[in-house]
Amino acid sequence: MLLAKLTVLIIVLPLLLCYGVGNVYSSTIHENREDLGSLLDFKQGISSDPNGALTNWTTSSHFCRWNGVNCTSTRPYRVRKLILTGLNLGGEISSSLGNLTSLNYLDLSNNSFLGHIPHLNKLQNLEYLYLGSNLLQSVIPNALTNCSNLVVLDLSGNNLNGVIPPRISFLTKLAYIHLDSNNLTGSIPAFLRNITNLQIASFSKNRLNGRIPDEVMQMPNLKELHLNQNNLSGQIPQALSNVSSLQGLSLTSNMLGSTVPSNIGDDLPNLTILYLASNNFEGHIPNSIGNPLRLEEIDLSINSFTGQIPTSLGNLSLLSYLNLERNMLQSTDNEGWEFFHALRNCSSLTSLSLSSNKLQGAIPDSIANLSTSLARLLMSGNSLSGIVPQSIGKFSSLVQLILDDNHLTGTIEEWVSDLTQLRYFSVAENQFTGVIPPNLGNLKSLLRLHLSYNNLQGGIPVEIGNLQLLMLNLSSNKLSGEIPGTLGNFENIQTIQMDQNILTGNVPSTFSNLHTLSMLNLSHNNLSGSLPSFLNDINSLTKLDLSYNNFEGDVPTNGVFDNATIISLDHNPGLCGGATDLHLPSCHLGDKRVGAVNYLVKILIPIFGFMSIQSFGEHFEKVTYNDLSVATRDFSESNLIGRGSHGLVYRGKLKESKMEVAVKVFDLEMRGAERSFLSECEALRSIQHRNLLPIITACSTVDNVGNVFKALVYELMPNGSLDTWLHHNREEEALKRLGLSQRISIAVNVADALDYLHHDCGRPTVHCDLKPNNILLDDDMNALLGDFGIARFYQDPQSTWAGSVSSIGVKGTIGYIPPEYGGGGHASTSGDVYSFGIVLLEIFTGKRPTDAMFIDGLDIIIFVENSFPDQIFHHVMDAHLVEECQNLTQENNVPEKEIYKSLVDLLQLALSCTRSLPSERPNMKQVASQMHAIKASQSGWKCK
Ligand SMILES: *[C@@H]1O[C@H](CO)[C@@H](O)[C@H](O)[C@H]1NC(C)=O
Ligand SMILES: *[C@@H]1O[C@H](CO)[C@@H](O)[C@H](O)[C@H]1NC(C)=O
Ligand SMILES: *[C@@H]1O[C@H](CO)[C@@H](O)[C@H](O)[C@H]1NC(C)=O
Ligand SMILES: *[C@@H]1O[C@H](CO)[C@@H](O)[C@H](O)[C@H]1NC(C)=O
Ligand SMILES: *[C@@H]1O[C@H](CO)[C@@H](O)[C@H](O)[C@H]1NC(C)=O
């Protein structure tokens, strides 16, 4: 042993002397041996050093000259500092560092060190320990608390778990402790109080729970307390006067609640930063908030604060950031707006958000007195009305101006053009009139422009093309004229939405230059001409909606046009061909329009002169082919409203009865259409229920060359299918949004219809193709089940159909078909129950069973099961419902528990319907009765 050490000395000594460490090394090498070994051990533990940070850690030079090493200035030279930060070092930190007993400063932060925090308990000289931003795991060792001289302890940004060690309170010299961004659990130790020197305590972004101990608010030197993003609950300790040194307090994103101590501003006179966002605070914002005169940043957003905004905020001359958004703060009268006048004294204000509160009335003219350094002004989602004061134009530093979702009127042209620094401008969902001012084109910094859902008129100014926009949303206005070619100049644009206007002409060919475009929505305009096939060159497109226009001609079968998930071309009567998924008429006979007409003529001609309504009783209206032809304007393409499983559906108005009808013409060239017609006639002949789509009549004829025409006439359902209400584009969102009660009531209607079919209509009938497309909505949003094209009679020996069921198998629609049908099972009522379960899941999650997210064994059932019941709000429910439920709780005082229970009941019912074994599913009668019970339980709620 001794011999070995001597050998090392003998080898090392000459090397060091040769490389001229000179005087430094001429002392006895003996004292440094330990440190040298420790450093070499440490180097050994490092498995990756991509930057070569340790390449000069060789015995050819004295370790005091190694990179990152600094030694004591007097003999014996010992390692005093080791600073290796941000060098991408990987591997474990060797415990040999625990032998560097002179170490005062250790900084290994910002690397990729793994494993445990080493034992450093012998390091009595260590004052600064930085191990933050690594990949360290396991617990914080208690032994660390032996380093009794620690002043700074920074372990933030690792994967540490377990609790904050109780003995940390022995580190009485500690001034800064950073444990944030780990995975620490347990509560905040009250005995932190013993660390009287503590100035900054940061425990944010962990999983700490429990209350904030009163003792923590009694630390005499505490300047900053960061507890944000934990699971803390309870209240802020009421007595804060013993922590009057506090300058920064961040409690954002916890579950803290009830009220904020009313004297917070008196007790904490040195506050500069106060973050209480995303908690459960309620009641008034304390007036004392205006007392800490150095207060610069206040964030109280996402709470339930009520009442008026205190005018005392006007005392805060240093206030630069004030965020009160997403509360229930009110200003209904002049007094309520006083705070706004008071803010004129906050001459440093740069960011003000009052969005999503209950502010009413006009934006006060006193806005002109706000600080000219204002860069962000957010007032969306209130009930602001009247015109925007023209003086808003003076805020030449404004970068973000968000006023959407109010009732503002007047024009934007009077004030917008002076806001030359604007990057983000949104006034969507208001009642602005006038034109889009051409001088918007002078706002050279503008990146996002949202003017949708207003009453803007006139053309889109060519000058807009001068901008470098990322997003342009002009949807739902009254914009007319052609789309300017200059819009093809947007080099970085990602989305363009100009749908629901009255734009004419074609898409400018310059759009082929929009190489970054991801979404283009031009639907619901009067655009015409041939399809802009040059859009095919834009590889970044993920959504192209050209529906509801007058484009005509061939649809290309390549690029975006070949992908039905990207493109939407519905309701362009002149289009034909294209990918089969688009279901457009083919262009096969010469000219496309002629082709399309022929397609119809082929089916319809045989009907002339002969009409039979055999199977239907007297109470069915008798209509002739001529009636239908007149009603649907010669089966014109503009009256085409959809495609059933086996044919085309036209809208029309019967002349005599003035009844609005949907005429389903069976395309008898489609496989199974004939059978489908018979099946549907047979099904509908004998059954009637308020939740089954009423059939007015049926007609069937054979022409002299043997061609057959068959059509069914139904009452027209003005609100279309459930599918379009559940899955609409973002633009339709506001118009077509189903509330919770509506969804429940639709589900009840469907359950009733199926219950009737299965149990009460004489002979059990299986629908076989239940899906939101087949659920239609009348004027009052009652749901009616339609499309009996593949309905089956269940085990009915009398029926000729019973026999054929097994031979042809059951089709249904992917996503809704029960598993047993896939295995060749026969149609059964429990198959419908399964489909009902899926539809129920779809109604409440807003996700189709065929959603792209359902891959690799994940399906909609497992998706819901995985989060059921505790996490359904966060992971499963349609976001709109979650929002509505929150509103219900907040505004209508429906207890959250009650809403939650209803939703759990609904999803539980849905999950029981979708069990894979048919025998484990409830029958439709049980389902319907449970649905009624759920509906009854929420009928007391006041909601839409
Ligand atoms: C080792 O590298 C560091 C950083 O490049 C440098 O400052 C130091 O002088 C080097 N030491 C020797 C002995 O070359
Ligand atoms: C390294 O140590 C010497 C003497 O011990 C000291 O003068 C110098 O400032 C230190 N360098 C760093 C970067 O700490
Ligand atoms: C630390 O030093 C002690 C005593 O000098 C020695 O026994 C031990 O092996 C060293 N530990 C490491 C990890 O180098
Ligand atoms: C805190 O300090 C008090 C008084 O000095 C002492 O009695 C107590 O043991 C200390 N507690 C901890 C956990 O350090
Ligand atoms: C935190 O710990 C929990 C279990 O205690 C674990 O599931 C989770 O993955 C951890 N998170 C991180 C970021 O390491």
Image (spheres, rainbow, N blue to C red):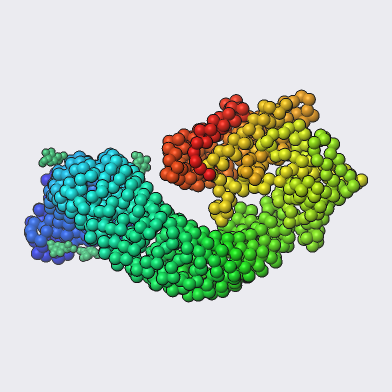
- The residue under the point 12% across, 51% down is 125
761 or 87, which is in the foreground?
Answer: 761
Report whether 50 appears left or right of 500. left
Where residue 781 sits: x, y (%)? 62, 43
Asked which quadrant contains residue 347, the reply is bottom left
Q: How many marks?
A: 0
Report whether 579 appears left or right of 909. right
Where residue 84 sits: x, y (%)? 24, 57
286 or 793, which is in the foreground?
Answer: 286
Asked which quadrant contains residue 346, the reply is bottom left
Where residue 688 sits: x, y (%)? 72, 33
- The residue under the point 39% across, 55% down is 331
- The residue under the point 20% across, 51% down is 267
**616 vs 111: above or below:** above
Where residue 155 sits: x, y (%)? 25, 49
317 or 138, which is in the foreground?
Answer: 317
Residue 875: tell me if it is visible: no
Report whether 570 appears left or right of 42. right
292 or 891, which is in the foreground?
Answer: 891
**687 vs 579: above or below:** above
Report whether 8 appears left or right of 753. left
- The residue under the point 74% across, 25% down is 796
**319 vs 484: above or below:** above
Which residue in the rendered view is the most extreme toward the front? Answer: 334
- Quadrant observed for ligand 4 in the rendered image: top left
